[in-house]
Amino acid sequence: MSKVSIGFFDDHPILLEGLVNIFSRFNDFAIVERGASAADAVRAAMTRQLDVIVLDLAMPGDVFDAIATICLERPDTKTIAFTASVGVDTAVRALDAGASGYVIKGSTAEELYSAIHAVLRGETFITQSFATKVISALRDATLRRAAAQAIRLSIREEQIVRLLLRGKTNKEIATRLQISEKTVKHYMSILMQKLSARNRIEVVLAAQRLNPDFGISPEMRRN
């Protein structure tokens, strides 16, 4: 039976050494790579035939981009985020990037061992104490993406929303866009219908849920 080739990447030398020492004792693993940055992980994935890469999310470099690159260029290599972060948004981002596992530092070696074998079977592994929150967040993210695909704002509608976010009145929006105030009111009616909103504030909030790139300005918060 061939051994599982694995690489560990963490910028904390003592932790990295500990992981290597622990997993070197398992007969089914061959530790063939180690490093301390996102670039190290990508380089190893591109030059070696690794079955699994375990990497810390807080290393130097863009680790999320590294995960996405590895998944795209080396689809047979599974990635596991091994991190101290218990932020649900961070977990969702890592899994969306393509990570097959998310294991919290503080877990036992046996749990990380189980995670490695789970992702090799094609499963997604999340630390048990954290899994319910992450699964719920992933479900919500999926629903938001589905809503965004179902509702499309025109360029003019987006322009109006962005000006609403800056606290502009209908008259000010009309002047800025060089259209009539009546036309602005017409677009507002369309936006409220599209976004199931009853007023300007609800239009803004619904637009934000649709597109997180929209941000509420201090002026809008005061209105």
Image (tube, rainbow, N blue to C red):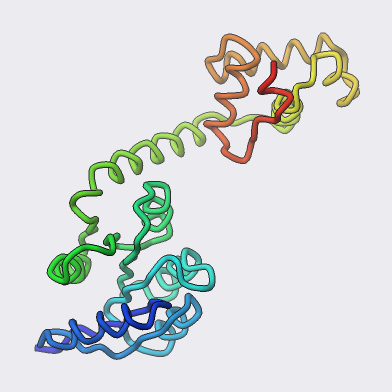
Give the answer, above or below, for where 16 lies relative to 80: below
Give the answer, above or below, for where 192 lies relative to 40: above
Rendering coords of residue 144 (x, y %): 45, 35
Image quadrant holding the N terminus, namely bottom left
Q: Residue at x 21, y 64 (%)?
A: 122
Give the answer, above or below, for where 25 lies relative to 223: below
Q: Residue at x 37, y 36 (%)?
A: 140
Q: Residue at x 52, y 73 (%)?
A: 60
| Residue furthest front as drawn | 14
Q: Residue at x 57, y 19 (%)?
A: 194
- 149 vs 64, nearest the viewer: 64
Rendering coords of residue 63 (x, y %): 47, 68
Tell me the quarter of the picture where residue 48 sits: bottom left
Number of residue marks = 0
Give the left or right position of residue 37, taking residue 208 as reference: left
- 32 vs 16, nearest the viewer: 16
Give the left or right position of residue 209, taking residue 168 as reference: left
- 211 vs 108, nearest the viewer: 108
Give the left or right position of residue 89, taking residue 62 as reference: left
Rendering coords of residue 170 (x, y %): 80, 14
Rendering coords of residue 116 (x, y %): 20, 71
Tell me the quarter of the picture where residue 212 sits: top right
Image quadrant holding the C terminus, namely top right
